[in-house]
Image (cartoon, helix red, strand yellow):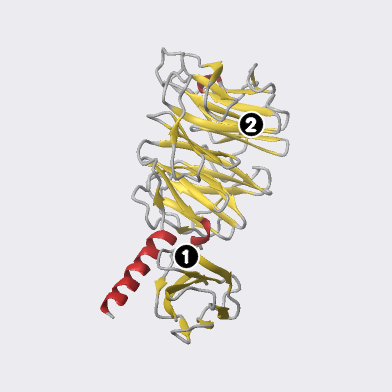
Amino acid sequence: MKKTILLFFCFVFFLNISFAQWQHTSLDSGMVRHIAKMGSILFAGTMEHGIYKSLDNGITWSLINNGLPYPIIRAIAIKGSKVFIGDNSSAPFDSLGGIFVSNDTGSTWIRVYRQNPDPSGISFLTVHDSTIYAGIGSSGIHKSIDDGLHWIPLADSIPSGAETLRMVVKDSLLIAGTSGSGIYTSIDNGTNWATSNNGLGTQYIYDLAVNNNDVFAGILDGGAFISSDNCSNWTAINNGIPNNSSMGNFVFYSNRIYTTTSCRGVFLSINNGQNWTAVNQGLSDTCMLSLCIMGNTIFAGTGTGVFKRPLSEMTGISEIISENNISVYPNPSSTTLTISTPFQSANAELSIMNIQGHILLKQALTQGKAVVDVSGFAKGMYFVKVNGDRRVEINKFIKN
């Protein structure tokens, strides 16, 4: 009996770790500046070791630096079957860095733009339709319409002292974020630029992102802002965000928004940024640099490698793990099992797992009750997990 109880509580702990926390992947060192996906392939660019690739959802990573002069990756962009990276040395008199492209998912790299002697290097790469945009230090924004063979500088009415750190495109509107001069927009494909800082000020822009009709801006020491009128007006959205947070790298999934903060971890909003909740369980490094969603998993680039977590385990409110509020009967059972819980959430999900943690059954749980057929299960102990209503409940049963 004591052994069974110990096994049960160990398994509850295992579920807490496995299902409700971030997990450090095998890429567990190096500052990961950017994560990007191409189908089921992940790419992670680091500031010390170059670029890595994972083919198995982040379980294993391989270094793919063939043809790169420096292991310093500031930006990654995917265009069809091509991977573009910004690789630079950050040395003021070194022009070996620049923009590189791979046509074979990173096996080899070819330079398509040689960096000018500029300590700022490549600040961003953005793909929109058939055009690639690049931020090239004090040289401003360039674009290529032929997969990087030729680069055209955009007419630059952005102050020369303000490096363009991020750029996104919303319909035909170009939106550029700078280092100290706020946001500029262009309606004529970059020929002319105008300031768009009403409600924002001349801030240092960490990140820009577009989701449906909204534009989100992450600010150095200033939190997050939103514009719903093509950047004409900006509103702060920092409820739940620690004061003086530097926000960056917004990603979107269904009705959820995830964002990073400098050394305060990942925050989640389920109401378009009006409220934010920290979702940092299991993160040993909360100095976040990048986020990427692939399938049902979110990946985070930190100062010490890549972490991952199932999206289904982040609800917007810190999870509560308990084994006291779920009823399982008859227990033991040989045919059917009735599962009852206080959950009244329409999105509650029921899972049955063996003692190895393998999921044998998964279904929706409506009105807090379900009857399941366990007659086909082998004899032994199993665990019932109900995830919903922003809680996680666990109990065990015996199949005889």
SS for callout 2 = loop
Per the image, the residue denoted by label 2 is 81
Q: Is 204 positioned to the left or the right of 169 in the image?
A: left
- Which three-letter amino acid code belongs to the residue tagged 2? Ser
Q: Is 31 positioned to the left or the right of 58 in the image?
A: left
Instruction: Give the residue drawn at x 51%, y 16%.
Output: 115
Q: Give the x, y percent position of residue 378.
A: 47, 73
Q: Is residue 62 above or below residue 322?
A: above
Considering the image in quadrants, where does the C terminus appear?
bottom left
Residue 144 makes an appearance in the image: yes
Q: Is residue 7 above or below residue 308?
A: below
Per the image, the residue denoted by label 1 is 317
Q: Is 230 positioned to the left or the right of 69 in the image?
A: right
**Between 271 and 354, the one nearer to me in the picture:** 354
Q: Is residue 332 above or below residue 83?
A: below
Q: Is 322 positioned to the left or the right of 99 in the image?
A: left
SS for callout 1 = loop
**Between 234 and 118, the one nearer to me in the picture:** 118
Task: Tell me which numbered mark, 2 or 1, is placed earlier along the sequence.
Answer: 2
Instruction: Give the residue drawn at x 44%, y 84%.
Output: 332
Considering the image in quadrants, where does the N terminus appear?
bottom left
